[in-house]
């Protein structure tokens, strides 16, 4: 049995589907119950309280660990999840980390994630670490304004990074969960191209077949919006990257192709699959 945390998110949903289609028994963990693929068991749990995972992990062979906001919750101890997994007999953990762990190692959110990575390495478990950069699915934050105003509002309109399709992350995660060859692997996951927010708006417009105008936000305006959904330190770390990416953050990584045997999906491919959200 494989446990997938964050199972209702942009990575967790396709990962759960892929594992189920591969014939694996899957337990999907999220805060809220949603419809799951046939045969997938859902458990509501909060990763900020790791003890609640004990009955979920009992009998599991592998765990996909996506911490998200739980990493930054008050008094959070995410390394306890790794200890609990080891005590429960889990043999393999695949951790969704962040590219910023190595490109911005002193950012507060990156320091916290590095601590989790280090705990996983020291756990005695089989492990793999995935380090994506920016997600293509972050564009979903513009969906309502595109639908209602025909507008994308974002900061740093002409500064790009190689955003990665969450479906590629999920496919790499499935490979790491199922294939022993990826034990001890650290994979940096990016898309195949550097693309700016303004260019992303143009791709959405092309897929819609109607104009989408671009409105550039100031950093303070963007931060105010972001902190409605993420902790302040994560917002600051993210804004630091997207305002002035360094050479490592602009690099097109070969790791998606190395694992999957194909190139990563471009942003317009993600848009084509998700265009209904913008209509």
Image (tube, rainbow, N blue to C red):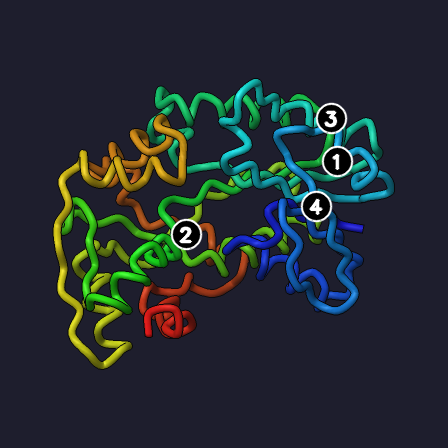
Tag of residue 254: 2
Tell whether label 2 touches label 3 (CB within 8 Å): no
Disc 2 versus disc 1: nearer the observer: 1
Q: Is residue 25 shown to the viewer in this render?
A: yes
Query: Sequence-wise, which precedes: disc 4 or disc 2?
Result: 4
Tell whether label 1 touches label 3 (CB within 8 Å): no
Disc 1 versus disc 4: nearer the observer: 4
Residue at x-position 32% and y-position 30%: 237
Query: Sequence-wise, which precedes: disc 4 or disc 3?
Result: 4
Give the side of residue 82 with respect to residue 76, left or right: right
Circle 3 packing at 10 Å, graded few (<14), some (14-19), many (20+), is few
Query: Sequence-wise, which precedes: disc 1 or disc 4?
Result: 4
Q: CA distance from mark 3 to mark 2?
A: 28 Å
Q: Which residue bears the numbered disc 3?
A: 124
Q: CA distance from mark 4 to mark 2?
A: 36 Å
Q: CA distance from mark 4 to mark 3?
A: 28 Å
Q: Is residue 191 above or below residue 274?
A: above
Q: Secondary structure at mark 3?
A: loop
Q: Where does residue 22 sit, x and y in percent of width and height?
A: 72, 65
């Amino acid at each position: 049995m494989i446990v997938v945390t964050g199972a209702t998110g942009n990575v967790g949903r396709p990962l759960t589907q892929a594992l189920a289609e591969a014939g694996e028994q899957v337990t999907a963990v999220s805060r809220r119950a949603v419809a799951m693929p046939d045969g997938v068991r859902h458990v509501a749990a909060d990763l900020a309280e790791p003890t609640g995972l004990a009955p979920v992990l009992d009998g599991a062979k592998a765990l996909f660990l996506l911490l998200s906001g739980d990493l930054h919750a008050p008094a959070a101890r995410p390394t306890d999840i790794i200890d609990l997994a080891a005590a429960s007999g889990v043999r393999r953990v695949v951790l969704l980390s962040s590219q910023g762990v190595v490109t911005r190692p002193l950012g507060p959110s990156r320091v916290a994630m590095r601590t989790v990575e280090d705990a996983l390495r020291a756990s005695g478990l089989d492990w793999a670490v995935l380090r994506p950069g920016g997600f293509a699915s972050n564009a979903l934050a513009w969906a309502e304004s595109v639908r209602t105003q025909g507008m994308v509002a974002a900061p740093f309109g002409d500064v790009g990074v190689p955003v990665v399709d969450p479906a590629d992350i999920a496919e790499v995660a499935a490979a790491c969960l199922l294939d022993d060859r990826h034990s001890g692997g650290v994979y940096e996951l990016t898309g195949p191209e550097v693309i700016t927010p303004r260019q992303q708006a143009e791709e959405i417009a092309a897929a819609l077949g109607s104009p989408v105008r671009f409105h550039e936000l100031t950093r303070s305006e963007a931060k105010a919006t972001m902190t409605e959904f993420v902790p302040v330190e994560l917002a600051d770390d993210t804004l630091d990257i997207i305002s002035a990416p360094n050479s490592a953050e602009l690099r097109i990584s070969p790791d998606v192709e190395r694992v999957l045997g194909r190139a990563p999906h471009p942003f317009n491919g993600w848009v084509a699959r998700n265009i209904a959200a913008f209509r």
